[in-house]
Amino acid sequence: MDIAIIGTGNVGGTLAKKWAMAGYNISLGVRDQYNFKGKELEDHPNINVMSVREATGKSEVILLATPAPLAIEVAKSLGDTSGKVIIDSMNVINGRGPEGYSNSADAILDNTSTKELAKCFNITGSQNLENPQYGNQALDMFTCGDSQKAKEIAVQLSQDAGFENCYDVGGNDKFEMMEQFAWFWINLAMVQGLGRDIGFKLLKR
């Protein structure tokens, strides 16, 4: 599977490495191919750097991992996304997001030509994306969206990144709840001082 990643910071860069090591072909879509965050990523044999539209055009799946206030601008920069799957990993934090929207995913859907979107990889820090293993068990991931196709791909990619399970928490109406879930983690890790080495695991009796 060919995956485009737009946003090469902590989240996008970490998942690019994890998925490249899992055997996927990764296209990093950047504005400036000679000067971008995470330039060392292009040293990996399965990662290539190109323009945003080139990356989108050659990929089946697009991960958006830019700051949420840029969601509309980034969505419009993708070009034709018809039939492509978008995975949104962004969060509106403290009201900082795309103008006129309470979450990033709705902004993306309104400004692209695909309805195949899932929100995923937004609920925890990059340290947990890098290493979701805690002792003898791995953290869980969560996804939501109306698109079953997109959620199935999100589940597969989360497992390929090392998460044990990826639970479906509902449709598009759960976008905002998923972003509140991210704020819950941020509150515990940073505001309450528990540190970034904490994560979520769903236990069943």
Image: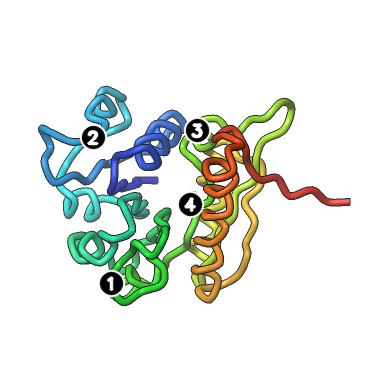
- Marks 3 and 2 sit apart, C-alpha to C-alpha, by 17 Å
Which residue is disc 4 drawn over? 122
Amino acid beneath label 3:
Gln
Residue that lies at the very extreme toward the front in this rendered image: 192
- Marks 3 and 1 sit apart, C-alpha to C-alpha, by 29 Å
Which residue is disc 2 drawn over? 37
Residue at coordinates 35% horizontally, 36% vertically from top-left? Answer: 13
Which of the marked residues, 3 or 1, is nearer the chain's N terminus?
1
Say if 139 sits above or below 79 in the image: above
- Marks 1 and 2 sit apart, C-alpha to C-alpha, by 25 Å
Which of the marked residues, 4 or 3, is nearer the chain's N terminus?
4
Residue 99 is marked as: 1
Element class at badge 1:
loop
Which of the marked residues, 1 or 2, is nearer the chain's N terminus?
2
Amino acid beneath label 4:
Asn
When asked about the image quadrant of residue 160, the answer is top right
